[in-house]
Image (cartoon, rainbow, N blue to C red):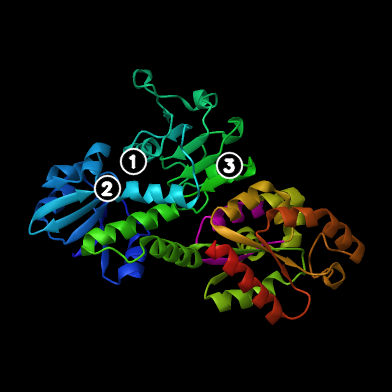
Amino acid sequence: MEYGLIGSRLGHSYSKIIHEMLCGYQYELRPLPTEAEARAFLEERSFKAINVTLPYKRLVMEYCTEIDPRAAAIGAVNTVVNENGRLYGYNTDYMGFDYLCRAHGVDFGGKTVLILGTGGTHNTTAAVARDRGAARILTVSRTPDPAKGELSYQEAKTSGAQIVINTTPAGMYPNVGVCNLDVAALPGLEAVLDVVYNPHRTELLLRAEEAGVPIVAGGLEMLVAQAVYAAEYFLHKPFADAEEEIARIAAALRRQLLNVVLIGMPGCGKTTVGRALAKALGRDFVDLDAEIVRAAGCSIPEIFTAEGEEGFRARETQQAQNFGKEKGLLISCGGGIVKKPENIRALRQNGGILWLDRPVEALTVGHGRPLSTSAEAVRQMETQRRPLYAAAADAVVPNHTTIEAAVTAALEALNEILDS
């Protein structure tokens, strides 16, 4: 191959999308499950340039004729350029993480930094924090080594850290929902950063947002930035404005990968508007209520009769978790999805949430909806749920007139959400 990525498992990598979107050359994902396969590939040297991911960022250094001083100091190489059989190693992860911090205004000066994990990315993020003036850098591990000054997750709660950086795979797709650190127990946090990029918001980041941490950022921009800087090495040519390219590709990826989630009262038009919006966006449409029915093998009224609302809500949560971690979908939710915070967290991890708001007097009554049996019941329900919709939504989309007007308003709202 000419350009590509090697690592043990690459099934969920975005690198091919990014590089081909960025430069147009063919970029190949080459999974090498064993060290023996990785060594054979590196010895053959049949490539122009490659990126390297886990677990081979250290191993590849053995094959490099020259290693950039920064990469040598960090002890990891993620970019290799082949010059007539001589391999040159670089670390653009450092540059990518540095960009992420600058883009979000993270101030390391004089701060205590808590880094979760002890792998190669720990060293990269620690180098950035140190170079940007951090006063103390503490390491947290599930199996801490006291001789190295490592902390347990319990000890981390009393560390006095202002900045937390996750370099572990905790919460990464498909094992989403995992969070090893209780960020709410750390007073005075100024920033929480996660190098994981899939999902867009890990459980750690969602909890940090709920705790009111001012700066919360995932790893997508870091991933794009390191790819942009790697492409400059690949092609021996800097971009006229690398940071503009990073912003452009990151925005394009968000548009392509993030889900669009519709919430709102029963009868507000989520299914009708959702199908039209999905068509406009070229996305698959998922109706969570229909998925609940499909999985249960019976209708929603039958579920309510057999299991009550509690049983239905448990099934709803399961479907929110199933589809919320996927990407590129248009998801229409039942009206009561907002009653359980874990549902919104599951949907926010990889999506933007739009509240389709329709006047209560225009909402339909009945139609097989167990909780919408009368106009009075709908009015009471709307009063109770309106604050929940407002808290969950990234934007409000009025559905007061036509379907076309609602779709237009939704597209405008999405432009702001996905480009931010």
Kind of residue indicated by mark 2: Asn
Q: CA distance from mark 3 to mark 1?
A: 23 Å
Kind of residue indicated by mark 3: Ala
Q: Which residues are magenta?
A: 315-334
Residue at (63%, 68%) from the top-left corner? Answer: 413
The numbered dot on residue 124 is 1
Residue at (22%, 64%) from the top-left corner? Answer: 235
Percent coordinates x, y for residue 76 in the rendering: 25, 42
In this rendering, does residue 278 appear at all?
yes
Above/below status of 154 relative to 341: above
Q: Earlier in the sequence, mark 1 or mark 2?
A: 2
Residue nearer the viewer, 121 or 296: 121
Q: Which residue is mark 2?
A: 91
Left or right: 128 with respect to 373?
A: left
Above/below status of 34 relative to 323: above
Q: Earlier in the sequence, mark 3 or mark 1?
A: 1
Q: Which residue is mark 3?
A: 208
